[in-house]
Structure formats: structure tokens, C-alpha cells
Amino acid sequence: MKTKTILSQIDQFFFAPSSGKVMAFFRITIAVFCLLKFWSLYNDLLNIFGSQGFVKGDVAAILLADYMPRLSWFSDAIATWGVAEVEAIYALFFFFILVLILLGVGFQTRLMSILALLIHLMFFNAGKMFMYGVDYFTTAALFYAVIMPLGKFYSLDNYLRSRAQNPGTVPIFFMRLLQLHLCLIYFFGGFPKTLGLHWWNGEAVWRALSIPGFYQLDMTWLATVPWLSVVLGWSVLVIELGYPIFIWFRKTRPVFLLLVSCMHLGIGVAMGLHYFAALMILLNVTAFGWPYLEKKGSWRHQPVLV
Amino acid sequence: MHPYKKIGYLAFLALHLGIIVNFNLFGLNGYQRAEVFDQLSNNGKRVFTAIKNYLPTRVPYVFVPYAHLAGIDTGYGLFAPNVPSAVSAAFELTDAAGRSTASLPMLNTREGLDRFNVNFNTFKNFEEIRPLLAYGWAIRMLELNPGHNKITVVIGSHLQPSMEAYRQGERAKFIESVRYEFELDGENNE
């Protein structure tokens, strides 16, 4: 009897029906995000991704394993038609934009998700030495776009179907996957920070805001109010270590969702990592925040997920 | 949903999350790197070593391409346990008349320049290919700066003073660690 109850709770936790609208939200926002992020590099396409750019193709290839998709697969293939690498890069760039638009509107959604992931990885690996956290998280988000049923809601695919196949719900499994992934991200981001001194004595915030690559605003005044750096450093620890626990409870979820969003917003503004901040907020809203957006104003009455 | 399908979903979930945990514990940015492991308490070290003895420390080869496709072949311990000093590169271009100009990497977009700086810091792990990287940058910079025949790539660290030291007047210092000089051999860079 007890085993049956446990199995039933597991079943409920992972496979209960949940709102399908979040799938449409995720599909549209991730497509728009990728479009904006990728477009921001348009004027540096050859500098970053070209084999004659800042990192020579043969040097970049040192870091790549055979199975990793790369631009040269495409450019070498169409070189046989007399197309130069530069033209191939621009052609793939505009094709990627088209794929993202079609993904956003939900046309051949699964196919577009697969193409988006593949092309993203081709660019990612070609410019690997220019890639950082946001690009890894973009890969993960596009991977989730491939496995999630994103085309079933508010999509062209759905509209074009001859009969209504929209049940309005999907198993919550896909959201659980994203939720658990986010919990691991924050736990593994937070725990090693507790082992050093910098996050306890405020030096971490002071140093992070002064690193030339991240320098956005003159924050030298922080040195005169060291307690503020300490508070900010401790806050990061509390948020990152508290998130994997408190995000699961109804009463604390909105608080931690807000805290983590503020943390990313702060990183975006103070360190200039705008795309990283936007993506992390987007993933958090998709994973945990959607019920509050869908039924705005009634968040106190949202059903508990646990 | 059929029970077998549910079991399949759960097995996939376990594998996916297991790979994430593995990369974070034992990957390039994982806990086994000295700067994290050495900071663990004795009990922490014992726990980590026990985990290491009982869990596979490498993702089985067949799952590595999957991890790459899924974007989970990385650790999440950025800026941990401490925030390191920033490493950066600058260029000194010299024309045929011997006039020198200092320059930052000539990327056209803010995002591109940010990526150069941000990412360069992660490449402290790849010291062996640094000369090759510098060579690539040098060629690109000469291509973008016709009329210059010689370029020096300077790589160094920005040492940021602590808040206490800053209050006492100390300021950030750039400590040069290595420089590479490249010159076009009898060619005109037009």
C-alpha cells in the first residue's frame, strides 16, 4: 500500500497534466532571444566565426572533437559548387534567422528546433573561443525545444491541422526536467563559492565589478561602503544555495523567483552580460514563473507543485 | 501515458541529470580542480574522495556527444571559489616608418569585444595554445590595419587591489606576463 502511494506520488510529480500555454511562451521567447543574440554579432560574423577571423580555423579545430558540428561541414560541402566560405557563413546566418522566425511562429516546429540546435552548434563550435556561459545555456534551451512538445500550442502547426488536437495540457515532465536542471545550476554555482573567502568578505563582488571585461559602471565607490559588498556577496550565496530548496514551496517560490531574477538583472546591468541575464530570467519564468503570469493576480492560490 | 513510456522518461531524466552532476564534479570546471578541492574541509575531502571512488569520474564515451548536443558538457562554478584576476590582451602596431599605435582587439560590435574579453579569461586553461592564438590575432589585426608591418601582442593580468588597499590609495595594475612579436617578412601590408 505504501509503495503504491509513493509510486502514485512520483507519477503525480512527474506526469500530472500542466498548462500547455507555457510551451508556446518558451517557444516564442527562446526564438526571439536567439534571434536578438545572434543578430548582435552580425557585424563580427567573419571576425568570430570565419576560419580567417581572430582565431584561425586550424587553431579552433584543436579544441573540437570529431562529432562536434562545425561551420566547415557546411562551407566545405557547398565549396564544391564554387561558394566561398564567406558567402557560406552569411548564407547560413540568414538561414538561421529564417529558422528562428519559423520556430517562433511554430511552423514545422520540431524540424525547426532541430535545425536551430544544429546551426547554433555549428556557429558555437566555429567560434568556440568566443563562447561563454550564455552560449552553453542557449544550447541547452534549444535542446529542450527539440524534446518538448512546443508546436502543440498557439502555433502555425496547430492552426494548420485539420482537426483540433490541442488537449490544452502536457505532462509536467518537461517542466520538471528544466526545473531540476535549474536547481543543479544554482547549487553547483553556489556551493564552491562558499569554499572561498571572496564571497564571504565582499571581495568577490568588488572584484567582479572591476574586471576589465565586465566593467560597465564606475563602482569604485563600493570600496568606501564595504559592508554593501559583503551583503551582496552573502545574498548571492543565499540565493544560489536556497534556490534548489525554497523554489519548491508555494510560499517561498515567488520570493526566490524574484530574488534570482533580481540577481540576474543586477549581473546584466552591472557586468554587461545582458543576454546571459535575459536567458536565465527567461528559463526561470518558463520553469517556475509561468503560473504567476498565466493567472496574474491570483498567485497566492496557485497549486503547489510539491 | 503507458507505464513503460513513463519509465523511459524517468530513465532519460536520471541520465541527463547524472551527466550534469558528473561534469560539475569531475569536468574541466568541476570540484576536482585544485582551487576547489584544496578549499574543502577534511570531512569535505573525505566525502568527495568517497564519491570519486564510487561514481564514474568520466561520462562514458557514448554519452559525451549527447552531452555536447544537450549543452550540458560544462560546469557551473563560475567565479568560484574566488574571483580570479582578469587576463587581457593588447596590441601594439608599428608602421613602416616605425610609428607605433596601441590598440585593443578590433571587433566591430560591443558583444564581440565583450566576448573577446570574457572568453579570454577562460583561456587561462589553455596556455599551450596561447602562442597560436596570439599568432591568429596578430594576422587578423594586420589585415585590419593596412600600412603596419609589425605587431606586438601583450598578454597580462589586471591585479585588482582589495577594497582595503584601494581605500589606502592602491590602484589596479597591469602585470605583463608574456609578449609575442610578429613582423611581415619583406612584404608590404597594403
Image (cartoon, helix red, strand yellow):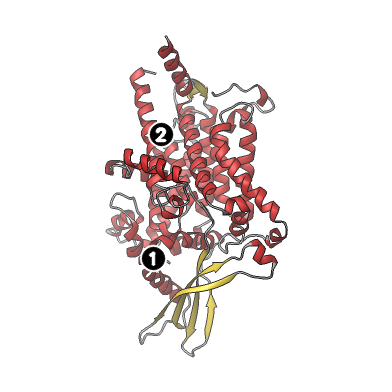
Mark 1, chain letter? B
Q: Nearer the viewer, residue A99 or B118?
A: B118
**Frontmost residue, B189 versus A188:** A188
The quadrant the N terminus of chain B occupies is top left
Q: Quadrant of the C terminus of chain B?
A: bottom left
Residue A160 seen anywhere in this rendered image of the structure: yes
**On screen, B148 above or below B171?**
below
Q: Relative to residue A263, is residue A90 depicted above or below?
A: below
Q: Amino acid at mark 2?
A: Ile
- For residue B167, above or below residue A15: below
Chain at tag 2: A
Residue A88: x percent and y percent? 37, 58
| Residue named by callout 1 | B127
Q: Quadrant of residue A255?
A: top right
Q: Residue at x 45, y 64 (%)?
A: A47
Count residues near mark 1 (Cα–Cα under 10 Å), then give few for <14, some for 14-19, many for 20+. Answer: few
Q: Is residue B4 left or right of residue A178?
A: left
Instruction: Please indicate, yes or no, whether residue A108 appears anywhere in the rendered image.
Output: no
Question: Which residue appears farthest toward the top when viewing the image?
Answer: A1
Q: Nearer the viewer, residue B92 or A96?
A: B92
Question: Residue at (29%, 55%) from the top-left corner?
Answer: A77
In-image side of A300 versus B2 (left or right):
right
The residue carrying mark 2 is A147
